[in-house]
Image (cartoon, rainbow, N blue to C red):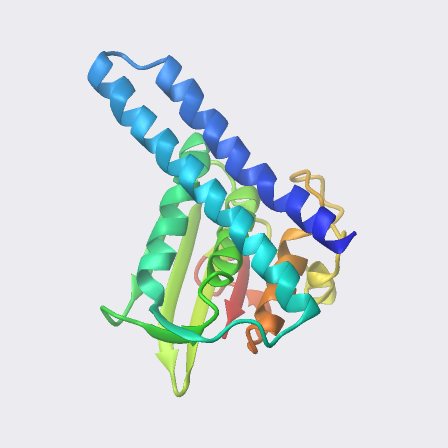
Amino acid sequence: RRFTATASHEMRTPVSVLKVNVQNALKARDEQERIQLLHELDAGVDRTGRLINQLLTMSRLEQDDHGYALQEIDLLPVLREEIAALYPLALQKQQNIELTSDVSCLPLLTVPQLVPLVVRNLVDNAIKYAPPAGRILVSARAEGDSVQISVEDSGPGVPPEEQQKIFERFYRIQNGVVSGSGLGLAIVRRTVELLGGAVRVSTSASLGGLCIQVS
């Protein structure tokens, strides 16, 4: 049941992106633009295939945490790819997404199949709650022997008394801003737990909305 709920939630966003890509291709002004948009659609299909593998990896790890060897990756290309994959949704709302880091390479020893699940859900959540023409800031840095990822938005934020509840499965803030299943941040927390990390939530000092930090 957990896998079914997680899979149905995770597939919703990439399918939405694919639909945007198809609509854009149908409205292309010329053949060159259409070909470019079809290439983007093709890349989106590849990403959806990888997502299926990530979900299967997560499911297997929940049953047996000894099946995957840790591998070293560079976190920054993962962040760029996931932001680019969701950018069509941000563009529809005329939002600005900024990625900052004080280094050019950010090594991370991890289960590489699971890191995109964390990044995708954090950025997707920020896009949903940031207003039209709003801002989203993704930052990454090394801190001691850990890596820190922060995602902030200029949305309405979350009252302090509810900030820990947003990681509960199916919990949704009753503000009527967006609709959703209440699973995205629960998936983030569970995936981070499987990776041996931690999640913290606060109010963004610079943007005023939600700030979620993963280490």
Q: Is residue 158 visible?
A: no
Check the image and name the residue furthest to the right: 1
Check the image and name the residue furthest to the bottom: 144
Q: Residue at x 36, y 37 (%)?
A: 43
Picture layout, residue 177 above or below residue 139:
above
Q: Residue at x 52, y 71 (%)?
A: 68
Near-viewer residue (194 or 149): 194
Where residue 135 sits in the image (x, y, percent)? 42, 48
Where residue 202 sits in the image (x, y, percent)? 58, 67
Q: Residue at x 60, y 72 (%)?
A: 194
Where residue 44 sits in the image (x, y, percent)? 41, 37
Picture layout, residue 186 above or below residue 38:
below
Count of numbered circles in the view:
0
Picture layout, residue 27 above or below residue 60:
above
* Residue 100 placement, left or right of 184: left
Near-viewer residue (60 or 141): 60
* Residue 62 placement, left or right of 138: right
Where residue 100 sits in the image (x, y, percent)? 31, 62
Near-viewer residue (130 or 214): 214
Q: Residue at x 25, y 72 (%)?
A: 103
Q: Is residue 58 visible?
A: yes
Near-viewer residue (72 or 131): 72
- Residue 33, by quadrant, is top left
